[in-house]
């Protein structure tokens, strides 16, 4: 057996043959000299790759929506581009290098020139040229184009990374596990894996190489993914049956806990009640949320509506999606977080901005304030849906009161537009803000004056307070939720909420972490929002502790000087009878 250990990013266990997804891995371009006599053959190979590329693009064009046709037409034109083709020919003759290497060099040079231009239009052309060049190179190298949408067998997907947009189009029924070189617990790929109930291990560094080596050796055996402890095991040999049974028993256990907990209240032994809500990314998830015992939607990451199409969704499409969630929740509250485009969630329409540091850039509320028409379209869709259920609106990444005031002013404008068009909307929709930038926790008392509730986004709060890119596996070890500084931000937010008589919720991954539940109760958190499938486990813990003990625990933790000390106190608490 060969075990690799990474970051347990999405719980559960899975077993299947592996499938290496290489779409996001740069192609390995060979570079060697050729004889003068082979120039002709290399040129012919290039022409034949162009022909095949044309057939491929035309097939996609016939198959796809009208709005993509423009892009595909541009790609077809590029295949005919006399300047590009002449450069390839000249270089072949002059430098006597293999054609893959020549295509790669020529396309890189053009792309670099386009990217260096201050004109945004040329940046977009660079993306198209890269796309076409990658296609030609793939055809020259005979590398098959893989897609996760067409999986027909049960697999464990192994890759360097998977983009959130790939996750949305993947055939989820067939994916029994995910193992990635990159990523971390709070990357959006991990969050989607949890949402879809797919066990995932990330930050493994070498798993793609391991799988490629095994594939080369003709070994495509079963691989076991343990999203609970971060292990990925190859070479199960005679233990296969043991692991198959383990997977089955694990699933049964989870199912039984879910059934047992579903209708019980989230109440401590001494009668303190808290609320357990679900985080969702796509409307379908809302349909299962109630079955897991969710009392509402605490975070609807509405930006996934934009990511699927790569463009802001139309008002009508958004309205329909929100209505679908409201209907599924049957009168329970639905908290729609306005779009949080940016970071690792890239939409093609960024209003022309190419950002060097997207995590520190025009993300979330900053994007919405910079593009008020897109923002107001979303707000109108939410307002129109509000008459059909119990809606709350939440703004992401608020860092100062001015942003909150501006967002609220745009909400008023959207209401006025609805009135003018004769669209009804609910009165008194609660509007809250996410606390995920450290300064927002510091000024929570100020923000509370204009907020109906807070929701603590620990994924970003940790990222920004500890200066740790949440997608970078190299620094993942520093992303410590129990860092005393992070805990102080959480406590400060909860206290400010309570002083202003509003509720403090948490929708970051920490809310669904069983190791943090007692502490969060002791800190006074009112609402926990998490992937729906985590609710039964969190509820089980809540029902097994007393609020009095949790407060004592929080007091003990307050004395700790490091995340390690906090962990020690929490572990000792778990060990108590
Ligand atoms: C967070 O930052 O904790 C959060 C819930 O928002 P997201 O993960 O979508 O950035
Ligand atoms: Mg966030």
Image (cartoon, grey):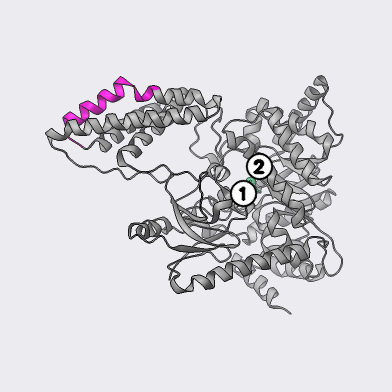
Q: Position of residue 522 (x, y in %)?
A: 76, 64
Residue linked to disc 2: 397
Q: In front here: 384 or 268? A: 384
The answer to whether the residue bearing label 2 lies less than 8 angstroms from the nearest atom of ligand 2 is yes
Residue for badge 1: 460
Check disc 2 and report its element: helix, strand or loop.
Answer: loop
- Relative placement, left or right, of 388 versus 133 is right
Quarter of the image where one finds residue 385? top right
The quadrant of the rendering that contains the C terminus is: bottom right
Q: How far apart in space, not on screen, are marks 1 and 2 (Cα)?
A: 8 Å
Asked if the residue at tag 2 contacts the one at tag 1, i.e. Cβ–Cβ closer than 8 Å, the answer is yes
Q: Nearer the viewer, residue 70 or 4?
A: 70
Quadrant of residue 228 within the rendered picture? bottom right
Q: Residue at x 25, y 23 (%)?
A: 86
Determine whether 253 is above or below 425 in the image. below
Q: Counting other residues with Cα less than 10 Å from the Cα at mark 1, is it few (<14), some (14-19), or many (20 or more)? A: many
Q: Nearer the viewer, residue 61 or 389?
A: 61
Question: Relative to residue 246, is residue 186 depicted above or below?
Answer: above
Span colored in magenta: 77-97
Q: Name which residue lies at 63% across and 72% down.
A: 568
523, above or below 336, in the image: below
From the Cβ of disc 1, is ligand 1 less than 8 Å away? yes
Residue 109 appears anywhere in the view: no
Quarter of the N terminus within the rendering: bottom left
């Amino acid at each position: 057996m060969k075990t690799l250990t990474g970051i347990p990013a999405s719980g559960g266990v899975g077993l299947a043959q592996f499938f290496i997804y290489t779409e996001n891995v740069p192609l390995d371009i060979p570079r060697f000299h050729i004889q003068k006599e082979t120039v002709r053959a290399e040129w012919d190979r290039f022409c034949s790759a162009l022909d095949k590329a044309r057939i491929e693009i035309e097939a996609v064009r016939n198959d796809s929506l009208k709005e993509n046709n423009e892009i595909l037409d541009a790609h077809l034109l590029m295949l005919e581009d006399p300047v590009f083709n002449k450069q390839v020919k000249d270089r072949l003759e002059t430098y006597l290098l293999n054609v893959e290497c020549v295509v790669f060099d020529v396309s890189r040079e053009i792309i670099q020139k386009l990217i260096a231009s201050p004109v945004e239009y040329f940046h977009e052309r660079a993306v198209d040229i890269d796309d076409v060049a990658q296609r030609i190179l793939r055809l020259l190298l005979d590398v098959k184009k893989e897609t996760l949408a067409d999986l027909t067998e049960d697999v464990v997907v192994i890759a360097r990374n998977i983009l959130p947009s790939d996750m949305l189009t993947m055939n989820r029924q067939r994916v029994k596990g995910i193992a990635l070189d990159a990523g971390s617990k709070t990357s959006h790929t991990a969050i989607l894996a949890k949402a879809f109930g797919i066990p995932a291990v990330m930050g493994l560094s070498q798993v793609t190489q391991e799988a490629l080596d095994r594939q080369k050796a003709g070994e495509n055996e079963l691989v076991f993914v343990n999203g609970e402890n971060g292990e990925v095991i190859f070479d199960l040999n005679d233990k296969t049956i043991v692991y198959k049974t383990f997977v089955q028993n694990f699933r049964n256990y989870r199912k039984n806990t879910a059934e047992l907990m579903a209708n019980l209240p989230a109440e401590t032994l001494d009668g303190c009640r808290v609320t357990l809500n679900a985080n969702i990314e796509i409307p379908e998830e809302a349909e299962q949320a109630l079955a897991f015992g969710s009392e509402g939607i605490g975070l609807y990451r509405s930006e996934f509506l934009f990511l699927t199409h790569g463009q802001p969704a139309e008002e009508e499409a958004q309205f329909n999606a929100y209505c679908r969630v409201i209907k599924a929740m049957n009168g329970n509250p639905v908290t729609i977080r306005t779009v949080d485009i940016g970071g690792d969630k890239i939409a093609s329409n960024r209003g022309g901005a190419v950002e060097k540091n997207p995590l520190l850039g025009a993300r979330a509320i900053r994007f919405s304030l910079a593009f008020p028409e897109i923002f107001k379209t979303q707000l109108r869709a939410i307002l129109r849906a509000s008459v059909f259920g119990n809606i709350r609106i939440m703004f992401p990444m608020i860092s100062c009161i001015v942003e909150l005031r501006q967002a609220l002013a745009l909400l008023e404008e959207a209401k006025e537009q609805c009135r003018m068009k004769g669209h009804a909307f609910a009165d008194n929709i609660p509007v809250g803000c996410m606390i995920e930038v450290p300064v927002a926790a510091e000024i929570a008392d100020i923000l509370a004056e204009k907020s109906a509730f807070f929701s603590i986004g620990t994924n970003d709060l940790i990222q920004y307070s500890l200066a740790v890119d949440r997608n970078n596996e190299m620094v993942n070890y520093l992303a410590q939720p129990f860092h005393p500084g992070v805990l102080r931000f959480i406590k400060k937010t909860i206290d400010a909420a309570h002083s202003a008589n509003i509720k403090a919720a948490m929708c970051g991954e920490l809310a669904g972490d069983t190791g943090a539940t007692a502490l969060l109760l002791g800190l006074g958190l009112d609402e926990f929002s998490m992937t729906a499938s985590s609710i039964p486990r969190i509820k089980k813990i809540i029902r097994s502790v007393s609020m009095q003990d949790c407060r004592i625990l929080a007091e003990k933790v307050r004395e700790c000087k490091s995340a390690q000390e906090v962990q020690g106190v929490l572990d000792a608490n778990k060990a108590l009878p």
